[in-house]
Image (cartoon, rainbow, N blue to C red):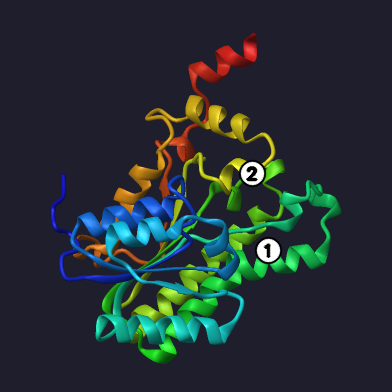
Amino acid sequence: MAYNLLKGKKGIIFGALDENSIAWKTAQHCYAEGAEIVLTNAPIALRMGTINKLAEEIKAPVIAADVTVGADIENLFTQAMEHFGGPVDFVLHSIGMSVNVRKGIPYCENNYEFTHKGFDISALSLHRVLQTAMKMDAINEWGSVVALTYIAAQRVFPDYNDMGDNKAVLESIARNFGYHYGAKKKVRVNTISQSPTRTTAGSGVKSFDGFFNYAEKMSPLGNADADECADYCVTLFSDLTKMVTMQNLFHDGGFSFTGVTPAVIEQMGK
């Protein structure tokens, strides 16, 4: 059921790769709530994914942008504002990548060249996007920026590797820019710490099924899926959350504040 929560709003969504991705679901849900969308991803991701199918469905242009290249981000905002006839109202940052994870390199043996690349894409890219948007005045007053994160920024999940470091920095950037952008233009910036989700990227983490099943047993409401995360993003893009900023919001069925559950105790006792 749609409520027209985003009627008249315009946004940019980073990171829609395929039908399993949270960014893909969020684009669909935003469109259903009345928003106009511009889709963007790295050129290589556009070639690998099926984003044109989504673009056709939600009547959105696709603009390639490498988030490690400032000129690409400037071009993205320039083209988006030309398309919309002005600044945007919301941005979703759904970007993350670790070469160390992909290559199965343990955390204590990380290749630092790979670490720097993952950090640049997964964390520093948010700073780059927000810095560019602020300079170009590309987000309307009372606009909203959301970045997706994971509780490995606060707790250790060994197989999540250097992505835990990346997410910790991502959340810090969101808090800091939330202050500066809020004071300057009333733009709010938040992160959503989502449950383990069966996306193409998430499933690439070693022992993902263990992550997923453990969180399911530890969460009184169970794991939140991609569609439910998309719904939460919609609320944060809407005017109903105008005074929420600089927050890391746990969307995880209660996992983040649960010490132990009978299901976990039973499993451990076997």
Residue 121 placement: quadrant: bottom right
Q: Quadrant of the N terminus?
A: top left
The dot on residue 158 is none
**What residue type is disc 2 on?**
Gly
At 35% from the left and 78% from the top, the residue drawn is 182
Q: Nearer the viewer, mark 1 or mark 2?
A: 2
Q: What residue type is labelled 1?
A: Gly
Left or right? Give the position of 32 relative to 248: left
Above or below, comparing residue 103 to residue 211 in the picture:
below
Residue ID for mark 1: 118
Q: Which of 56 and 164 is in front in this view?
A: 56
Residue 222 rendering spot, x and y as whole percentages: 41, 30
Q: As displayed, is residue 136 above or below residue 152?
A: below
Q: Toward the viewer: 203 or 171?
A: 203
Residue at x 52% of width, y 30% of height: 259
Task: Residue under label 2, please give it.
Answer: 204
> For the view shown, which residue lies furthest in the right direction?
109
